[in-house]
Image (cartoon, rainbow, N blue to C red):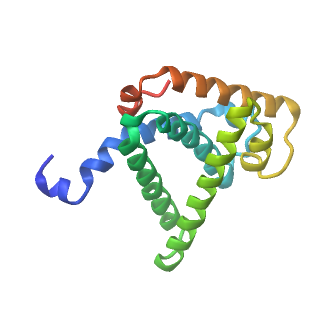
Amino acid sequence: MGWFDRLLGRERDELALALYDGVIATARAPHWYTTGGVPDTLDGRFDMVAAILSLVLLRLEGDASAGAASARLTERFVTDMDGQLRESGIGDIGVGKHIGKMMGMLGGRLGAYRDGLVSGDLSTALVRNLYRGVMPDAVALAHSQRALLALRDALGATPAAALIDGRMP
């Protein structure tokens, strides 16, 4: 990579791209939408990406060597959401407002999932954030909770360097 790319920040973006792609691939797994009952809509897909991204950020938060990776991953999320909003027809003036709202939503989810993980029960956070306040059937909720807790455990067992390289469990 040349100095011009580094000057424009492309190197930082590339470093987060593999991990972000892993987050997206995990969030797109069909079981979330079939067995887990997450609505397969624009909002549902955003909520699933935010849930997976939150778990990854919380995992990296516990590793002092991964602070820069967390920042880059969050920047990559903003870049992706910016592109998605523009592609959906939202103009320059509205994009900033929407990005701010999405970042607030991500921050709220980080807190809710952190609290749920500490207590060992994600159901309240999931109903509010993944199902947007609509109680899913018990099987769907149990599936999503089990799968997210298993992902949290797998992320915890994966070295931070492997995650940063994009090797999602």
Q: Position of residue 8 (x, y in %)?
A: 22, 60
Query: How many numbered discs, if any?
Result: 0
* Front position in the image: 79 or 42: 79
> Residue 121 occupies which quadrant of the picture?
top right
Image height check: is 67 above or below 97?
Answer: above
Q: Residue at x 55, y 73 (%)?
A: 97
Q: Position of residue 81 (x, y in %)?
A: 50, 58
Q: Residue furthest left?
A: 3
Q: Position of residue 120 (x, y in %)?
A: 73, 29
Left or right for 13, reference 51 = left
> Residue 51 occupies which quadrant of the picture?
top right
Q: Residue at x 42, y 30 (%)?
A: 163
Left or right for 59, reference 143 = left
* Front position in the image: 76 or 43: 76
Q: Residue furthest bottom?
A: 93
Q: Position of residue 18 (x, y in %)?
A: 38, 37
Q: Residue furthest front?
A: 64
Q: Residue at x 80, y 33 (%)?
A: 140
